[in-house]
Amino acid sequence: MSVETQHTDNNDMFRWLAACLVLSALHSPQAMAGQDNGLVAHTDSECDFIVIQTHYAWALVQWYGGERPNEGDILLGEFGSYRMQTMYNRTRQANVEVLADRYWLTEDEAFARYADQCRKESR
């Protein structure tokens, strides 16, 4: 291996390590604790289910209590596991009780499951 090739390999390794450090620094303390921000992408007063978009996937939560979130609200909670929880609505500065029902969905899956669940509720 020539000195020039070794120097290039070291630069590539340094760039890769620097990128990893920058990405890890961008995570908030909440994200490190399993919590994330989620954007309320769709909700309807006729249905208790809410479509949430996070930075990594889509989720479907069911509203159980507290001030009902509106489209555009930002919720702080754990969107990656099935469980009942109190999320914090950052937009309205209020707690909301939800069941994280479905998670790690694509956008199409989230809206399809939303339609299925809301159709069941209306029966």
Image (cartoon, rainbow, N blue to C red):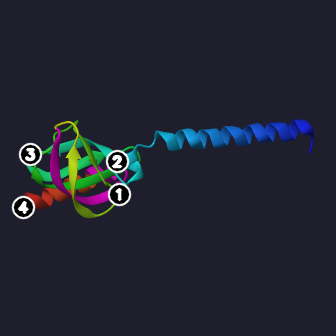
Tags 4 and 2 touching, CB below 8 Å = no
* 68 shown above or below 119: above
Answer whether residue 94 is magenta in the image.
Answer: yes
Q: Nearer the viewer, mark 3 or mark 2?
A: 2
Q: Which span is picked out in magenta?
A: 93-111
Q: Name the residue located 52 percent from the left edge and 44 percent from the top edge.
A: 24
Per the image, is 1 magenta?
A: no
Q: On residue 80, which mark appears?
A: 1
Residue identifier under label 4: 123
Characterize the local packing of mark 1: few (<14), some (14-19) or many (20 or more) Cα atoms within 10 angstroms: many
User: Magenta region, mostly helix, strand or loop?
Assistant: strand
Which of 66/122 is in front?
Answer: 66
- Tell me what residue is drawn at x 78 percent, y 41 percent: 10
Q: Residues within 10 Å of mark 2 (few under 14, many from 20)?
A: many
Residue 109 x, y percent position in the rendering: 32, 53
- Nearer-N-terminus badge (3/4): 3
Question: Which element is circle 3 on?
Answer: loop
Q: Earlier in the sequence, mark 4 or mark 1?
A: 1
Q: Which residue is mark 2?
A: 36
Q: Are marks 2 and 1 in contact (CB under 8 Å)?
A: yes
Q: Mark 3 and mark 4: span between their CA atoms?
A: 16 Å
Q: From the viewer's perspective, is the residue at label 1 or at label 3 nearer?
A: 1
Q: Nearer the viewer, mark 2 or mark 1?
A: 2
Whichever of callouts 4 and 2 sits on the residue coming sooner in the sequence is 2
